[in-house]
Image (spheres, helix red, strand yellow):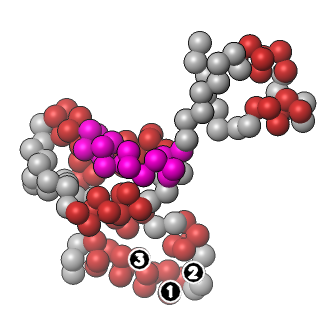
Amino acid sequence: MVAATNRDLAKSVAAREFRSDLFYRLNVFPVRMPPLRERVNDVPLLVRYFVQKFARRMNKPIETIPTETMNALVGWEWPGNVRELENFIERSVILSAGKVLSVPLAELVPASSSFFSGTLENLERQHIIRVLRETRG
């Protein structure tokens, strides 16, 4: 059996939030998989794999991933790990019209900087600027 969690189960057992007998059954051979943000070298490999997978599935001839795009993808922390990256690439393939992967880079902005930046007017301005950059005017 393979089980995965993002919680520290040993701490949960100590705090009596998780059953110790179940923990010891699951903890026979623990494997720690570091988060994607600690494996940045894996991001380009995963991006290329997911682009091929979804392009083939959708019959789209995507052949190129711009360097700027790949740099942005490598620089993102991927709090949702590989699943978040996979979903993002699938959405990007859906949005791509030609042979070049079109990625909604504006989505790779931390929520704190995009939602808590002051007035509604300032938020609208940031959104317009982001869209203009993404669409190149």
| Image coordinates for residue 102, horizontal then vertical, percent | 22, 58
> Quick one: 133 or 124, which is closer to the camera?
133
Q: Is residue 102 above or below residue 25?
A: below
Does residue 66 lie above or below 5 as drawn? below
* Front-lying residue, 59 or 81: 81
Answer whether residue 11 is visible to the viewer in this image.
Answer: yes
Q: Which residues are magenta?
A: 35-50
Q: Inspect the image, locate mark 2, and give the three-letter code of the amino acid beneath it.
A: Ser
Q: Residue at x 59, y 84 (%)?
A: 118
Q: Amino acid at mark 3?
A: His
Q: Residue 117 has which mark?
A: 2
Residue 77's disc number: none
Is residue 94 among the parts visible in the rendering? no
Give the residue number, with chain letter if any, for mark 1: 122
**Of helix, strand and loop, which one carries label 2?**
loop
**Residue of label 3:** 127
Looking at the rendered image, the quarter that the C terminus falls into is: bottom left
Contact between marks 2 and 1 (CB within 8 A): the answer is yes
The local secondary structure at tag 1 comes to helix
Q: Which callout, 2 or 1, points to the residue nearer the camera?
A: 2
- Describe residue 26's horizontal placement relative to residue 45 as left or right: right
- Pointer 2 or 1: first along the chain: 2
Side (left or right) of 60 relative to 29 = left
Residue type pointed to by label 1 = Asn
Q: Residues within 10 Å of mark 3 (few under 14, many from 20)?
A: some
